[in-house]
Amino acid sequence: MKKLSFDAIEKQLLGYPDWEYRDDCLTTLFEFENFKDAFGAMTRIAFECEAHNHHPDWSNSYNKLSITLTTHDAGGVTQKDLDLMVAIEQIVEEEE
């Protein structure tokens, strides 16, 4: 998979204000009402990651979920990352 240009990534991020492009990665921080909701979202996201065969770097602290997406083999952000970002957004919107 080919690494995307800065312009291509920035264009895709216009519709996703919670996501940021930096250091060849897409990053976000979601805040949920409580730990249970954060963990529930993580569980649903995990199944989606398996379906995409693409996995984030992420961490959870109580009600906060930090996610970083990059395609290590390509050395940056690829279409796989953008596709997974969209899927994650849909899951988080359903949790709210």
Image (cartoon, rainbow, N blue to C red):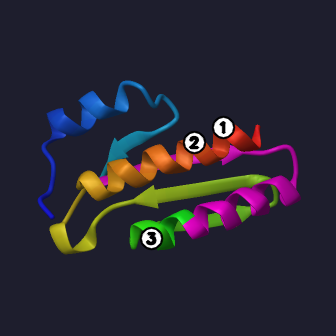
- Residue 37, horizontal then vertical, whole percent: 82, 53
Which is nearer the N-term, disc 3 or disc 1? 3
Q: CA distance from mark 3 to mark 1?
A: 20 Å
Circles 3 and 2: CB atoms closer than 8 Å: no
Position of residue 75 relative to residue 41, above or below, is below
Which is nearer the N-term, disc 3 or disc 2? 3
User: Please, what secondary structure does the residue beneath circle 2 have?
Assistant: helix
Of residues 78 and 91, the one nearer the viewer is: 91
- The residue under label 3 is which amino acid type? His
- The residue under label 2 is which amino acid type? Gln
Of residues 37 and 59, the one nearer the viewer is: 37
Furthest residue toward front: 51
Q: CA distance from mark 2 to mark 1?
A: 5 Å
Residue underneath mark 3: 55
Q: On the image, which quarter does residue 3 sit in?
A: bottom left
Q: CA distance from mark 3 to mark 2?
A: 16 Å
Position of residue 6 relative to residue 38, above or below, is above
> For mark 2, does the 10 Å Cα neighbourhood hold few (<14), some (14 to 19), or many (20 or more) residues?
few
Question: Residue 70 bears which disc, if any?
Answer: none
Circles 3 and 1: CB atoms closer than 8 Å: no
Q: Which residues are magenta?
A: 25-47
Question: Residue 93 bears which disc, if any?
Answer: 1
Quarter of the picture containing the N terminus is bottom left
Residue underneath mark 2: 90
| Horizontal side, residue 18 vs residue 93: left or right | left
